[in-house]
Image (cartoon, rainbow, N blue to C red):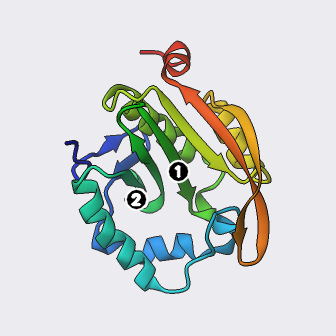
Amino acid sequence: MLAFDRVTLNTQRLRLRPYTPSDAEALFAIYSDVRVMRYWSYPPWSSIDQANEMIAKDATTLAAGEHLRLGVETVDDARLVGHCSLFNLNAQCRRAEIGYGLAFDAWGHGYMHEALTAVLNYGFSELALNRVEADIDPRNAASAKALERLGFLNEGLLRERWVVDGEVSDSGLYGLLRRDWLARTPR
């Protein structure tokens, strides 16, 4: 059984690591921001208790290898600016879904591309994944662009899949295969 509670990934500007209790305020600031949560499948958080619950739950689920969710921290000032995750891991099919979010004030700096590259490298090498999937709101052009820049292909649309706070939205489905990642990623 794999455990993810000690996984840390480092890039030039970022450190991806499991959450700690001291991350609660930063997490709440990110997940309660309506600009960040605009295209998510659940509404913005309304209480810091939600941050504390996520941190506590992750302590158990990461240790059990149920999913990999890592906070994205800037190296220069150790500020938590987001998260990247691999979830719905399917060992038999060597498949996972990827998720991510970034604080509004961190948008436009290339952090998410850097973080997702590290997580995809880990997934395709250490976890031997064959396929990674993403499900985004197709109105989120920045997210679509981020995925396409990494080599994900738009593979379909699920109409009216989500209802969040009374708003109905579609799901854009994206996929990336290991062979395509390796063909475009220098080793």
Q: Work out whether residue 65 or residue 56 is closer to the camera in this orientation and state it.
A: 65
- Residue 60, position in %: x, y? 24, 63
Q: Mark 1 or mark 2, which has the lower sequence index? A: 2
- Circle 2 crowding by C-alpha within 10 Å: few under 14, some 14–19, many from 20: few
Q: Seen in the image, is 49 located left or right of residue 30?
A: left
- Identified at 68% across, 47% down, the residue is 143
Task: Answer with the quarter of the image where residue 187 lies.
Answer: top left
Q: Secondary structure at mark 1?
A: strand
Task: Answer with the quarter of the image where residue 54 lies.
Answer: bottom left
Task: Answer with the quarter of the image where residue 55 lies.
Answer: bottom left
Tell me the number on the disc at residue 85: none
Looking at the image, residue 156 lies above or below residue 79: above
Q: Label 2 is placed on what type of residue?
A: Asp
- Residue 176, position in %: x, y? 57, 29
Q: Work out whether residue 149 or residue 157 is closer to the camera in this orientation and state it.
A: 157
Would you name the residue on which mark 2 appears? 77
Q: Label 1 is placed on what type of residue?
A: Gly
Q: Seen in the image, is 56 located left or right of residue 148?
A: left
Looking at the image, residue 44 lies above or below residue 14: below
Residue extending furthest toward the front: 92
Between the residue at mark 1 and the residue at mark 2, the CA separation in whole angstroms equals: 24 Å
Would you name the residue on which mark 1 appears? 99
- Residue 31, position in %: x, y? 55, 71
Q: Secondary structure at mark 2?
A: loop
Looking at the image, residue 21 lies above or below residue 6: below
- Circle 1 crowding by C-alpha within 10 Å: few under 14, some 14–19, many from 20: some
